[in-house]
Image (cartoon, grey):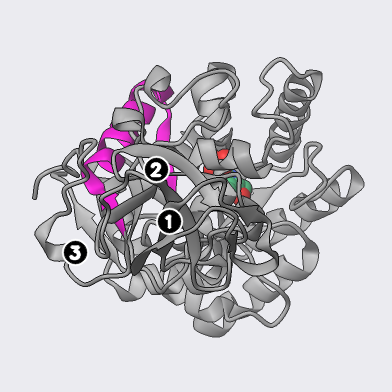
Protein backbone atom coordinates (compact mmCIF):
# COMPACT_ATOMS: atom_id res chain seq x y z
CA UNK A 1 0.00 0.00 0.00
CA UNK A 2 1.15 3.52 -0.71
CA UNK A 3 0.88 6.40 1.70
CA UNK A 4 -2.31 8.45 1.49
CA UNK A 5 -1.96 10.11 -1.90
CA UNK A 6 -2.05 13.84 -1.89
CA UNK A 7 -5.49 14.66 -3.23
CA UNK A 8 -4.20 17.94 -4.56
CA UNK A 9 -6.38 20.97 -5.06
CA UNK A 10 -8.42 18.92 -7.55
CA UNK A 11 -9.22 16.36 -4.83
CA UNK A 12 -8.99 13.18 -6.88
CA UNK A 13 -10.64 10.38 -4.92
CA UNK A 14 -9.02 6.97 -4.56
CA UNK A 15 -10.91 4.22 -6.42
CA UNK A 16 -11.85 2.25 -3.29
CA UNK A 17 -14.00 5.10 -1.99
CA UNK A 18 -16.67 4.94 -4.69
CA UNK A 19 -20.16 5.33 -3.32
CA UNK A 20 -19.14 6.09 0.25
CA UNK A 21 -20.85 9.10 1.83
CA UNK A 22 -17.87 9.69 4.02
CA UNK A 23 -14.78 7.86 5.15
CA UNK A 24 -11.67 8.20 7.25
CA UNK A 25 -8.34 7.46 5.62
CA UNK A 26 -5.71 6.36 8.10
CA UNK A 27 -2.06 6.44 7.06
CA UNK A 28 -0.46 3.56 8.95
CA UNK A 29 2.93 4.56 7.57
CA UNK A 30 2.50 7.90 9.31
CA UNK A 31 1.73 6.15 12.61
CA UNK A 32 4.83 3.96 12.29
CA UNK A 33 6.90 7.01 11.34
CA UNK A 34 5.56 9.00 14.29
CA UNK A 35 6.41 6.23 16.73
CA UNK A 36 9.92 5.99 15.28
CA UNK A 37 10.29 9.72 15.81
CA UNK A 38 8.95 9.52 19.38
CA UNK A 39 11.30 6.62 20.12
CA UNK A 40 14.21 8.67 18.80
CA UNK A 41 13.27 11.54 21.09
CA UNK A 42 12.70 9.20 24.03
CA UNK A 43 16.35 8.10 23.90
CA UNK A 44 16.90 5.22 26.30
CA UNK A 45 13.24 5.12 27.32
CA UNK A 46 10.82 2.69 25.70
CA UNK A 47 7.59 3.75 24.03
CA UNK A 48 4.10 2.74 25.14
CA UNK A 49 1.76 3.71 22.31
CA UNK A 50 -1.59 4.75 23.74
CA UNK A 51 -4.37 3.23 21.65
CA UNK A 52 -7.36 4.01 23.88
CA UNK A 53 -10.64 5.25 22.40
CA UNK A 54 -10.15 3.16 19.26
CA UNK A 55 -6.68 4.61 18.85
CA UNK A 56 -8.01 8.18 19.03
CA UNK A 57 -10.51 7.30 16.33
CA UNK A 58 -7.94 5.75 13.98
CA UNK A 59 -8.85 2.11 14.68
CA UNK A 60 -7.27 0.27 17.61
CA UNK A 61 -5.96 -2.88 15.97
CA UNK A 62 -4.37 -1.53 12.77
CA UNK A 63 -2.97 1.39 14.73
CA UNK A 64 -1.54 -0.93 17.38
CA UNK A 65 0.18 -3.03 14.75
CA UNK A 66 1.57 0.08 13.03
CA UNK A 67 2.82 1.48 16.34
CA UNK A 68 4.56 -1.81 17.17
CA UNK A 69 6.11 -1.85 13.69
CA UNK A 70 7.41 1.66 14.38
CA UNK A 71 9.19 0.53 17.53
CA UNK A 72 6.67 0.78 20.35
CA UNK A 73 7.19 -2.10 22.77
CA UNK A 74 4.18 -1.39 24.95
CA UNK A 75 0.52 -0.58 24.35
CA UNK A 76 -1.75 1.37 26.68
CA UNK A 77 -5.53 1.58 26.86
CA UNK A 78 -7.89 3.19 29.34
CA UNK A 79 -10.51 0.49 29.73
CA UNK A 80 -10.18 -3.19 30.47
CA UNK A 81 -12.53 -4.06 27.59
CA UNK A 82 -10.26 -2.29 25.16
CA UNK A 83 -7.32 -4.34 26.39
CA UNK A 84 -9.24 -7.60 26.07
CA UNK A 85 -10.17 -6.74 22.48
CA UNK A 86 -6.52 -6.19 21.62
CA UNK A 87 -5.60 -9.56 23.14
CA UNK A 88 -8.52 -11.27 21.37
CA UNK A 89 -7.01 -10.05 18.10
CA UNK A 90 -3.80 -11.88 18.92
CA UNK A 91 -1.65 -8.89 19.80
CA UNK A 92 0.63 -10.07 22.60
CA UNK A 93 2.73 -6.97 23.35
CA UNK A 94 2.94 -5.83 26.98
CA UNK A 95 -0.13 -3.73 27.65
CA UNK A 96 -1.36 -1.54 30.49
CA UNK A 97 -4.97 -0.69 31.33
CA UNK A 98 -5.88 1.78 34.03
CA UNK A 99 -9.59 2.46 34.26
CA UNK A 100 -11.85 -0.11 35.86
CA UNK A 101 -14.39 -0.22 38.65
CA UNK A 102 -15.08 -2.63 41.49
CA UNK A 103 -16.33 -5.95 40.14
CA UNK A 104 -14.53 -5.59 36.79
CA UNK A 105 -13.30 -8.83 35.22
CA UNK A 106 -9.74 -8.64 36.47
CA UNK A 107 -9.54 -12.44 36.17
CA UNK A 108 -9.77 -12.09 32.40
CA UNK A 109 -7.13 -9.40 32.43
CA UNK A 110 -4.74 -11.48 34.51
CA UNK A 111 -5.28 -14.59 32.38
CA UNK A 112 -4.67 -12.51 29.24
CA UNK A 113 -1.41 -11.12 30.55
CA UNK A 114 -2.73 -7.56 30.76
CA UNK A 115 -1.03 -5.24 33.23
CA UNK A 116 -3.43 -3.53 35.62
CA UNK A 117 -2.96 -0.13 37.15
CA UNK A 118 -3.63 0.08 40.87
CA UNK A 119 -4.69 3.36 42.47
CA UNK A 120 -6.47 2.15 45.59
CA UNK A 121 -6.57 -0.68 48.15
CA UNK A 122 -9.87 -2.06 46.81
CA UNK A 123 -8.33 -2.55 43.38
CA UNK A 124 -5.32 -4.32 44.81
CA UNK A 125 -7.58 -6.52 46.96
CA UNK A 126 -9.64 -7.58 43.93
CA UNK A 127 -6.51 -8.31 41.92
CA UNK A 128 -4.94 -10.29 44.75
CA UNK A 129 -8.15 -12.31 45.18
CA UNK A 130 -8.26 -13.08 41.45
CA UNK A 131 -4.59 -14.06 41.35
CA UNK A 132 -5.06 -16.43 44.29
CA UNK A 133 -8.17 -17.91 42.67
CA UNK A 134 -6.27 -18.50 39.46
CA UNK A 135 -3.08 -19.63 41.11
CA UNK A 136 -1.03 -17.08 39.24
CA UNK A 137 0.78 -13.77 39.66
CA UNK A 138 -0.87 -10.56 38.45
CA UNK A 139 1.19 -7.81 36.82
CA UNK A 140 0.46 -4.39 38.28
CA UNK A 141 1.61 -0.79 37.94
CA UNK A 142 1.18 1.28 41.07
CA UNK A 143 -0.20 4.70 40.27
CA UNK A 144 0.73 7.70 42.34
CA UNK A 145 -1.25 10.92 42.19
CA UNK A 146 1.47 13.54 41.92
CA UNK A 147 -0.90 16.47 41.48
CA UNK A 148 -3.51 15.86 38.78
CA UNK A 149 -5.94 14.55 41.41
CA UNK A 150 -7.32 12.06 38.91
CA UNK A 151 -6.15 8.42 39.14
CA UNK A 152 -3.53 7.39 41.65
CA UNK A 153 -3.02 7.31 45.39
CA UNK A 154 -1.82 10.39 47.18
CA UNK A 155 -0.04 11.19 50.44
CA UNK A 156 -0.96 8.76 53.22
CA UNK A 157 -3.04 6.81 50.68
CA UNK A 158 0.18 6.04 48.76
CA UNK A 159 1.92 4.87 51.91
CA UNK A 160 -0.98 2.57 52.71
CA UNK A 161 -1.21 1.26 49.15
CA UNK A 162 2.45 0.39 48.80
CA UNK A 163 2.42 -1.34 52.20
CA UNK A 164 -0.36 -3.59 50.93
CA UNK A 165 1.46 -4.07 47.66
CA UNK A 166 4.59 -5.22 49.49
CA UNK A 167 2.54 -7.89 51.28
CA UNK A 168 0.97 -9.04 48.01
CA UNK A 169 4.41 -9.26 46.41
CA UNK A 170 5.68 -11.28 49.37
CA UNK A 171 2.89 -13.84 48.99
CA UNK A 172 3.47 -14.04 45.25
CA UNK A 173 0.05 -12.85 44.11
CA UNK A 174 1.32 -9.74 42.34
CA UNK A 175 4.45 -8.53 40.62
CA UNK A 176 4.97 -4.76 40.56
CA UNK A 177 6.00 -4.04 36.99
CA UNK A 178 5.70 -0.28 37.03
CA UNK A 179 5.19 2.89 39.00
CA UNK A 180 3.54 5.74 37.22
CA UNK A 181 1.70 9.04 37.22
CA UNK A 182 0.26 11.65 34.85
CA UNK A 183 0.86 15.39 34.39
CA UNK A 184 -1.69 18.18 34.78
CA UNK A 185 0.22 20.72 32.68
CA UNK A 186 2.41 18.71 30.30
CA UNK A 187 1.30 21.03 27.49
CA UNK A 188 2.84 23.97 29.36
CA UNK A 189 6.33 22.59 30.01
CA UNK A 190 7.45 25.62 32.01
CA UNK A 191 4.51 25.51 34.37
CA UNK A 192 5.80 25.10 37.95
CA UNK A 193 3.55 22.08 38.58
CA UNK A 194 5.53 20.08 36.03
CA UNK A 195 8.73 20.14 38.06
CA UNK A 196 6.74 19.77 41.27
CA UNK A 197 4.99 16.63 40.02
CA UNK A 198 8.34 15.14 39.03
CA UNK A 199 9.65 15.77 42.56
CA UNK A 200 6.60 14.08 44.10
CA UNK A 201 7.00 11.21 41.62
CA UNK A 202 10.63 10.66 42.51
CA UNK A 203 9.77 10.74 46.23
CA UNK A 204 7.05 8.15 45.63
CA UNK A 205 9.50 5.90 43.78
CA UNK A 206 11.96 6.24 46.68
CA UNK A 207 9.23 5.40 49.18
CA UNK A 208 8.40 2.34 47.11
CA UNK A 209 12.03 1.25 47.24
CA UNK A 210 11.81 1.73 51.01
CA UNK A 211 9.25 -1.09 51.23
CA UNK A 212 11.49 -3.28 49.11
CA UNK A 213 9.90 -2.76 45.68
CA UNK A 214 12.70 -1.85 43.30
CA UNK A 215 13.56 -2.34 39.64
CA UNK A 216 10.19 -1.09 38.50
CA UNK A 217 9.50 0.71 35.24
CA UNK A 218 8.95 4.42 35.95
CA UNK A 219 6.66 6.24 33.54
CA UNK A 220 5.19 9.72 33.56
CA UNK A 221 5.37 11.38 30.12
CA UNK A 222 2.45 11.74 27.70
CA UNK A 223 2.97 13.13 24.19
CA UNK A 224 3.62 16.69 25.31
CA UNK A 225 6.21 15.66 27.90
CA UNK A 226 7.80 13.20 25.47
CA UNK A 227 8.29 16.03 22.98
CA UNK A 228 9.20 18.87 25.34
CA UNK A 229 10.58 17.48 28.60
CA UNK A 230 13.38 14.88 28.39
CA UNK A 231 13.79 14.97 32.18
CA UNK A 232 10.36 13.30 32.43
CA UNK A 233 11.12 10.38 30.14
CA UNK A 234 12.32 7.99 32.89
CA UNK A 235 12.11 4.37 31.64
CA UNK A 236 9.05 4.53 29.42
CA UNK A 237 7.03 7.26 27.71
CA UNK A 238 3.29 7.08 26.99
CA UNK A 239 2.46 9.16 23.92
CA UNK A 240 -1.04 9.03 22.48
CA UNK A 241 -1.89 12.07 20.38
CA UNK A 242 1.57 12.40 18.83
CA UNK A 243 1.40 8.78 17.63
CA UNK A 244 -1.36 9.96 15.33
CA UNK A 245 0.67 12.92 14.13
CA UNK A 246 -1.10 15.71 15.97
CA UNK A 247 0.63 18.34 18.05
CA UNK A 248 -0.17 18.21 21.77
CA UNK A 249 1.30 21.69 22.08
CA UNK A 250 -0.14 23.56 19.08
CA UNK A 251 1.02 26.90 20.47
CA UNK A 252 4.60 25.64 20.68
CA UNK A 253 4.89 23.69 17.46
CA UNK A 254 3.10 22.10 14.54
CA UNK A 255 3.28 18.36 13.86
CA UNK A 256 5.96 18.97 11.21
CA UNK A 257 8.03 20.93 13.75
CA UNK A 258 8.23 17.70 15.75
CA UNK A 259 8.77 15.40 12.77
CA UNK A 260 5.20 14.08 12.96
CA UNK A 261 2.69 13.43 10.18
CA UNK A 262 -1.08 13.56 10.64
CA UNK A 263 -2.43 10.05 10.10
CA UNK A 264 -6.14 10.83 9.71
CA UNK A 265 -8.00 12.39 6.83
CA UNK A 266 -11.78 12.81 7.00
CA UNK A 267 -13.45 13.01 3.61
CA UNK A 268 -17.08 13.16 2.49
CA UNK A 269 -18.73 13.22 -0.92
CA UNK A 270 -21.37 15.77 -1.83
CA UNK A 271 -24.80 14.16 -1.74
CA UNK A 272 -26.47 17.01 -3.64
CA UNK A 273 -25.69 20.36 -5.18
CA UNK A 274 -28.31 22.97 -5.98
CA UNK A 275 -28.44 26.52 -7.22
CA UNK A 276 -30.34 28.93 -5.01
CA UNK A 277 -31.21 32.60 -5.18
CA UNK A 278 -29.74 35.47 -3.16
CA UNK A 279 -31.29 35.76 0.27
CA UNK A 280 -31.96 32.02 0.71
CA UNK A 281 -31.94 30.87 4.35
CA UNK A 282 -29.73 27.81 4.75
CA UNK A 283 -30.19 24.92 7.22
CA UNK A 284 -32.07 24.97 10.53
CA UNK A 285 -32.83 28.41 11.88
CA UNK A 286 -31.53 30.08 8.72
CA UNK A 287 -28.44 31.25 10.57
CA UNK A 288 -26.76 31.50 7.15
CA UNK A 289 -28.38 33.49 4.37
CA UNK A 290 -26.91 33.55 0.86
CA UNK A 291 -25.59 36.94 -0.15
CA UNK A 292 -25.95 36.27 -3.88
CA UNK A 293 -27.31 33.59 -6.17
CA UNK A 294 -25.05 30.65 -5.48
CA UNK A 295 -24.52 26.88 -5.56
CA UNK A 296 -24.96 24.96 -2.29
CA UNK A 297 -23.38 21.61 -1.57
CA UNK A 298 -24.86 19.07 0.83
CA UNK A 299 -22.27 17.17 2.88
CA UNK A 300 -23.69 13.93 4.30
CA UNK A 301 -21.98 14.06 7.70
CA UNK A 302 -23.39 15.56 10.87
CA UNK A 303 -23.04 15.79 14.58
CA UNK A 304 -23.90 12.12 15.00
CA UNK A 305 -20.73 11.42 13.01
CA UNK A 306 -18.64 13.66 15.23
CA UNK A 307 -18.90 16.90 13.27
CA UNK A 308 -19.55 19.16 16.24
CA UNK A 309 -22.71 21.25 16.16
CA UNK A 310 -20.67 24.23 17.26
CA UNK A 311 -18.72 23.89 14.00
CA UNK A 312 -21.80 25.53 12.44
CA UNK A 313 -20.73 28.41 10.17
CA UNK A 314 -17.17 28.42 11.51
CA UNK A 315 -15.23 25.22 10.78
CA UNK A 316 -13.36 25.07 7.45
CA UNK A 317 -13.71 22.45 4.76
CA UNK A 318 -11.98 22.12 1.41
CA UNK A 319 -14.14 21.59 -1.66
CA UNK A 320 -14.17 22.60 -5.30
CA UNK A 321 -10.57 23.79 -5.15
CA UNK A 322 -10.82 26.09 -2.16
CA UNK A 323 -11.35 26.38 1.52
CA UNK A 324 -14.72 27.56 2.86
CA UNK A 325 -16.59 27.53 6.15
CA UNK A 326 -19.64 25.39 6.85
CA UNK A 327 -22.78 27.32 5.84
CA UNK A 328 -25.27 27.45 8.71
CA UNK A 329 -26.12 24.80 11.25
CA UNK A 330 -24.62 21.34 11.36
CA UNK A 331 -27.53 18.85 11.51
CA UNK A 332 -27.49 15.30 12.84
CA UNK A 333 -26.53 13.70 9.53
CA UNK A 334 -25.61 16.53 7.19
CA UNK A 335 -24.48 20.10 6.72
CA UNK A 336 -24.25 22.56 3.85
CA UNK A 337 -21.49 24.55 2.21
CA UNK A 338 -21.78 27.57 -0.06
CA UNK A 339 -19.76 26.67 -3.14
CA UNK A 340 -20.19 30.08 -4.74
CA UNK A 341 -21.88 31.29 -7.93
CA UNK A 342 -19.18 30.11 -10.32
CA UNK A 343 -18.86 26.63 -8.86
CA UNK A 344 -19.00 23.68 -11.21
CA UNK A 345 -19.15 21.14 -8.37
CA UNK A 346 -21.50 18.20 -8.79
CA UNK A 347 -22.91 15.51 -6.52
CA UNK A 348 -20.21 12.99 -5.67
CA UNK A 349 -17.41 15.53 -5.52
CA UNK A 350 -15.13 15.18 -2.49
CA UNK A 351 -15.01 17.45 0.52
CA UNK A 352 -12.13 17.26 2.98
CA UNK A 353 -12.99 18.12 6.57
CA UNK A 354 -9.49 17.67 7.93
CA UNK A 355 -6.24 15.95 7.11
CA UNK A 356 -2.55 16.63 6.92
CA UNK A 357 -3.00 20.21 5.77
CA UNK A 358 -1.23 19.77 2.44
CA UNK A 359 -2.23 22.21 -0.31
CA UNK A 360 -4.06 24.39 2.21
CA UNK A 361 -6.43 21.65 3.32
CA UNK A 362 -7.74 22.14 6.86
CA UNK A 363 -6.33 20.21 9.81
CA UNK A 364 -7.92 18.85 12.97
CA UNK A 365 -6.09 21.67 14.73
CA UNK A 366 -7.84 24.21 12.47
CA UNK A 367 -11.15 22.67 13.51
CA UNK A 368 -10.13 22.74 17.17
CA UNK A 369 -9.31 26.44 16.92
CA UNK A 370 -12.57 27.16 15.10
CA UNK A 371 -14.76 25.26 17.54
CA UNK A 372 -13.07 26.08 20.84
CA UNK A 373 -11.85 22.60 21.67
CA UNK A 374 -8.72 20.47 21.30
CA UNK A 375 -7.65 18.30 18.37
CA UNK A 376 -7.97 15.26 20.66
CA UNK A 377 -11.73 15.69 20.93
CA UNK A 378 -12.29 16.02 17.21
CA UNK A 379 -10.42 12.90 16.11
CA UNK A 380 -11.74 10.69 18.92
CA UNK A 381 -15.35 11.55 18.21
CA UNK A 382 -15.50 10.66 14.53
CA UNK A 383 -18.19 8.01 14.59
CA UNK A 384 -18.58 4.45 13.41
CA UNK A 385 -20.67 5.37 10.34
CA UNK A 386 -17.46 6.37 8.61
CA UNK A 387 -15.45 3.37 7.46
CA UNK A 388 -11.73 3.52 8.16
CA UNK A 389 -9.63 2.91 5.06
CA UNK A 390 -6.05 1.96 5.82
CA UNK A 391 -3.13 3.15 3.73
CA UNK A 392 0.57 3.25 4.01
CA UNK A 393 3.69 1.13 4.22
CA UNK A 394 4.81 0.20 7.70
C1 LIG B 1 -4.44 9.46 27.32
C2 LIG B 1 -3.31 9.24 28.22
C3 LIG B 1 -1.99 9.31 27.76
C4 LIG B 1 -1.64 9.82 26.38
O1 LIG B 1 -1.84 11.21 26.39
P1 LIG B 1 -1.49 12.13 25.11
O2 LIG B 1 -1.65 13.50 25.61
O3 LIG B 1 -2.51 11.76 24.08
O4 LIG B 1 -0.13 11.76 24.71
C5 LIG B 1 -0.98 8.94 28.62
N1 LIG B 1 -1.24 8.55 29.88
C6 LIG B 1 -2.50 8.52 30.37
C7 LIG B 1 -2.74 8.10 31.77
C8 LIG B 1 -3.57 8.87 29.57
O5 LIG B 1 -4.81 8.86 30.07
Percent across and percent down for residue 174 are 58, 62
Q: CA distance from mark 2 to mark 3?
A: 22 Å
What residue sits 39% from the left and 46% below the top?
341
Determine whether 174 is above or below 290 in the image. below
- Are circles 2 and 3 on residues that touch, CB within 8 Å? no
How packed is label 1: few (under 14 Cα within 10 Å), some, or many (20 or more)?
Answer: many
**Residue 28 is inside the magenta segment:** yes
Residue 55 badge: 1
Q: Is residue 81 left or right of residue 20?
A: right
152 or 380: nearer the viewer = 380
Residue 360 lies in what quarter of the image?
Answer: top left
> Most extreme residue toward the top, as rendered?
190
> Ligand 1 is located in which of the four quadrants?
top right
Q: CA distance from mark 2 to mark 1?
A: 8 Å
What residue sits 60% from the left and 58% below the top?
308
Percent across and percent down for residue 41 are 40, 21
Q: Is residue 383 left or right of residue 132?
A: left
Q: Which residues are magenta?
A: 24-50
Counting residues from the start of the chain, the first of labels 2 and 1 encountered is 1
Quadrant of the snapshot with the C terminus:
top left
The answer to whether residue 47 is seen in the rendering is: no
What residue sits 45% from the left and 36% below the top?
246
Q: Secondary structure at mark 3?
A: helix
Q: CA distance from mark 3 to mark 1?
A: 22 Å
Give the labeled residue for mark 3. Answer: 17
Percent across and percent down for residue 349 are 25, 57
Q: Mark 2, mark 3: which one is toward the viewer?
A: 3
Residue 244 badge: 2
Amino acid sequence: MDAIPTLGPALVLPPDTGGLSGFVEVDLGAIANNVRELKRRAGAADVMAIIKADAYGHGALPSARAALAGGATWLGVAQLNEALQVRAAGIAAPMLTWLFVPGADVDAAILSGIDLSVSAPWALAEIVAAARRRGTTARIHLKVDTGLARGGARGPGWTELIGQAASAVAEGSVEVIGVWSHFAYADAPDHPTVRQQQIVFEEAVAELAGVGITNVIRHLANSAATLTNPSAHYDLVRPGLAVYGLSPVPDLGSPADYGLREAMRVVACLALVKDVEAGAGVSYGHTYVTSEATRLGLVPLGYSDGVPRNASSVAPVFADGRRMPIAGRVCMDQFLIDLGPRSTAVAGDPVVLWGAGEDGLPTAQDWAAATGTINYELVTRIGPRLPRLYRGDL
